[in-house]
């Protein structure tokens, strides 16, 4: 009886999941496989997806997402190791500092980077005062990468940190006692044991980077079209939900693959629970 009552407590979440996850996904699948003119079954929408312009946007999106994810790993792993090696009181405060920017609105954080990077922005003003050449970075792919790394870096730090603080230090010390160098201990012991956090962080950075359109709009000046921008145009400007849904199905495949990989390396959810 008690277990049945507990199951009923999950009913609000079931309603929420059905209304905001399952039903929208069913609509996307429906529109992706139906014709805008006749409403009948068709695969023509996917034919419109595999065109030069769309594939170019998808390729650029994949490239920028991979670069952003790699930069996040290179920045996040050392930071997570430093945090894991600190005292408890220091850890809690510094982790709070990393989480604090996430409390600010996503658009405001991106607008801040626009203010910093624009031609007459803060960075170029400081460089001009120092008689240094200005940075021509706004409205370029690198500006978008900066925005992605800044916005999504905490999602890489926290999963890795969460795994590192749970590592059995006796295993690490045993490797050192057996003559392993610091690098060998890291590469053979620490990194493999922290892989669930790395995979979880990669998933939480790569997928938002791949699907974003706000960052490219603001920092790319609307001149650099990513796959997210093209989906937005199909839905909002061209009012073609069918082709837009077909594009979304392509991105959904990347999401599914990422989830499969994460489940393979992080079966216990160590990299996602704080």
Image (cartoon, grey):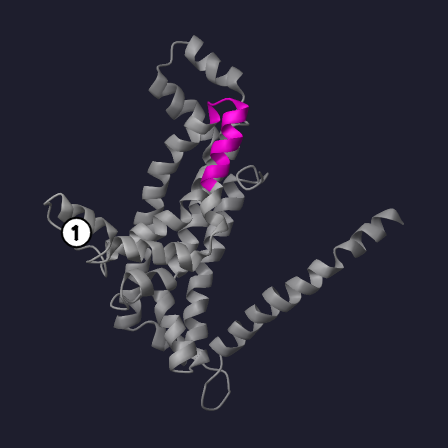
Label 1, secondary structure: give it: loop
Is residue 128 visible in the rendered structure shown here?
yes
Quarter assignment of residue 244: bottom left
Q: Position of residue 43 (x, y in %)?
A: 43, 78
- The answer to whether residue 87 is magenta is yes
- The answer to whether residue 78 is magenta is no
Q: Is residue 130 above or below residue 243?
A: above
Quarter assignment of residue 10: bottom right
At 36% from the left and 48% from the top, the residue drawn is 150
Numbered disc total: 1
At 42% from the left and 78% from the top, the residue drawn is 236
113 sits to left or right of 38: left
At 70% from the left and 64% from the top, the residue drawn is 15
View extreme (right): residue: 1
The residue stretch that appears in magenta: 84-98
Is residue 200 visible in the rendered structure shown here?
no
Q: How crowded is the residue under tag 1: few (<14 C-alpha within 10 Å), some, or many (20+)? A: some
Q: Is residue 44 above or below residue 119?
A: below
Q: Position of residue 109 (x, y in %)?
A: 39, 54
At 47% from the left and 48% from the top, the residue drawn is 102
Q: Which residue is mark 1?
A: 135
Q: Quadrant of the C terminus?
A: top right
Q: Nearer the viewer, residue 2 or 266?
A: 2
Q: Position of residue 156 (x, y in %)?
A: 43, 42
Q: Nearer the viewer, residue 258 or 203?
A: 203
Q: Nearer the viewer, residue 108 or 88?
A: 108
Q: Is residue 57 above or below residue 136?
A: below
Report the magenta stretch's main SS: helix
Q: Is residue 176 above or below residue 163?
A: above
Q: Position of residue 3 (x, y in %)?
A: 83, 48
Quarter assignment of residue 75: top left
């Amino acid at each position: 009886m008690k277990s049945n009552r507990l199951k009923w407590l999950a009913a609000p979440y079931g309603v929420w999941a059905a209304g905001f996850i399952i039903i929208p996904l069913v609509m996307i699948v429906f529109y992706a496989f139906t014709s805008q003119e006749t409403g009948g079954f068709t695969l023509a929408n996917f034919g419109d997806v595999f065109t030069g312009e769309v594939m170019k946007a998808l390729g650029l999106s994949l490239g920028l997402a991979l670069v952003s994810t790699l930069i996040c790993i290179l920045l996040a792993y050392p930071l997570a190791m430093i945090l894991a090696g600190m005292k408890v009181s220091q850890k809690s405060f510094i982790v709070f500092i990393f989480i604090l920017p996430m409390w600010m609105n996503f658009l405001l954080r991106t607008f801040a980077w626009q203010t910093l990077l624009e031609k007459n922005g803060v960075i170029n003003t400081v460089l001009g005062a120092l008689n240094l050449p200005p940075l021509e970075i706004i409205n370029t792919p690198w500006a978008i990468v900066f925005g992605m790394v800044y916005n999504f870096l905490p999602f890489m730090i926290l999963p890795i940190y969460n795994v590192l603080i749970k590592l059995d230090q006796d295993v690490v010390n045993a490797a050192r006692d057996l003559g392993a160098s610091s690098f060998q201990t890291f590469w053979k012991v620490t990194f493999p044991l922290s892989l669930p956090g790395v995979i979880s962080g990669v998933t939480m950075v790569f997928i938002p980077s791949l699907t974003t359109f706000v960052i490219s709009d603001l920092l790319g000046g609307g001149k650099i079209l990513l796959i997210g921008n093209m989906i937005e145009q199909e839905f909002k400007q061209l009012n073609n939900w069918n082709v837009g849904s077909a594009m979304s199905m392509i991105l959904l495949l990347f999401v599914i693959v990422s989830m499969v990989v994460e489940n393979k390396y992080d079966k216990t959810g160590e990299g996602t629970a704080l």
